[in-house]
Image: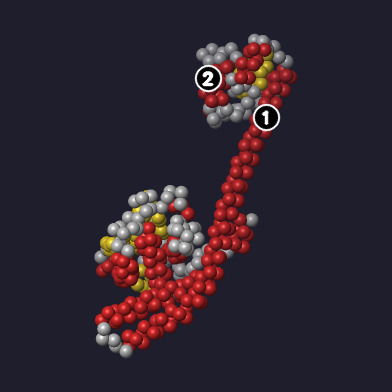
Amino acid sequence: MRAYIASVLHPDYDIVLTATGAEALAAIRERRPDVIVSDIMMPEMDGYELVTRLKRAPELRDIPVVVLSAKASREEAVRGLEVGADDYLPKPFAPAELRARVGAALRLHRVHREVVAQKQELEQTLRILKDTQDQLVQSSKMAAVGTLVAGLSHELNNPVAIIRMSAQMLLRRGSRDPFVRRTLERIDRHSQRCAGLVEALLAYSRRRPQVAERCELGQVLTWLLELARPETAERGIRLVADFAAEKLPALVVHRPALESALLNVIGNAADATSRGGIIEVHARAAAGDDDVDGAEILIRDSGVGIAPQALPHVFEPFFTTKAPGKGTGLGLPMTQKFVQAHGGTIHVDSELGRGTTVRMWLPLVPPEPPELPLVPEPARLAQEVL
């Protein structure tokens, strides 16, 4: 019978013959044929068992099976179809009928493969559309950020300049009260920092390169902790420095943007930490993924933590876990843009109820002059996708 079937089909098909159900299963796994023609009555494993095993295997279940049997009863035909056969041909059969059944099964298989391919292509298209939509939303948000910070920067520039000039004038008068003098010095330092932030915001909104300078990371961190410590102390939060300032390397960065990025993270940590909590600032020289020399800064708090479902969104503009009116949702996105613009990396790990860790790595020298914001413009993005 096998030789007869082969002779009927051979002019149009490449034929592989097997003697038992077990041999057939092994050959099917190896060759992955387009159509399977199987007898019901076979040694070791009958046709029903063979079809059952084929339909249980995800990689084989889509191959059409035509079963042959001398048992022409309706019950046998129904059983063959129930176990998964795609067609049933009782013996004896005419050669033309066998060729027609096999041809129909082959066409069915080809249509199925085309449908699967189209489904996969459609799913890929939907993924691309979803990614594009997300990017466009992100781009629109960052465009809104640019407009917002441009307006704020102009509004802040004059008051900050007046505050700083007034503090410097009072300092030059030489007050003998140590408390007054320390307070004026703090006002001068903070107004100087505000002026730097205004400059950074203007550069951000105008999309112009930042002026990078060589600065000692240890000095920057020490100064920032001095600025932040009075506020954290007032909240009953311990701010702990775990680094040797003199052992930290110098970085070529836009210093106001670096200060703003670090204070954003420290401020977030303070907002999330209750009285009696702790914020740790660690820093060390560390090589990056490509063995590029750099520095790692780690800021860890013992605060409330971030919910797992919120963690993937912390770098999205305007996303915040704080209460309404307590946060803008711009601190971490701008921090991320600063780090990326300088060729660095930033990661956030958090456990609800146990605290959050922000890990930043910056190269000693950025690979190219940093430019902020590094945000794709909507029109350009659409052209690339299309």
Q: Nearer the viewer, residue 369 or 217?
A: 217
Mark 2 packing: few (<14 Cα in 10 Å), some, or many (20+)? Answer: few
In this rendering, the label closer to the viewer, 1 or 2: 1
Marks 1/2: CA–CA distance: 25 Å
Q: Nearer the viewer, residue 178 or 59?
A: 178
Q: Residue at x 63, y 19 (%)?
A: 81
Looking at the image, can residue 37 be seen? no
Q: Is residue 357 above or below residue 68?
A: below
Residue 23: mark: 2
- Where does the image place residue 200, in percent across and percent down from the top left? 46, 72
Q: Amino acid at mark 2?
A: Glu
Mark 1 packing: few (<14 Cα in 10 Å), some, or many (20+)? Answer: some
Q: Is residue 192 above or below residue 87?
A: below
Q: Residue at x 43, y 48 (%)?
A: 308
Q: Identify the colour scheme used.
A: secondary structure
Looking at the image, can residue 58 be seen? yes
Q: Which residue is mark 1?
A: 108
Give SS at disc 2. Answer: helix
Give the position of the N terminus as an image quadrant.
top right
Q: Is residue 307 above or below residue 163?
A: above
Q: Nearer the viewer, residue 359 or 30?
A: 359
Q: Residue at x 44, y 58 (%)?
A: 322
- Where does the image place residue 124, in percent across and percent down from the top left? 59, 45
Query: Which corner quadrant of the image does residue 3 belong to?
Result: top right
Q: Is residue 338 above or below residue 347?
A: below
Q: Amino acid at mark 1?
A: Leu
- Specify whether 284 is left or right of 100: left
Tell me, yes or no, whether the two marked residues, 1 and 2, touch with CB atoms within 8 Å. no
Label 1 vs 2, first from the N-terminus: 2
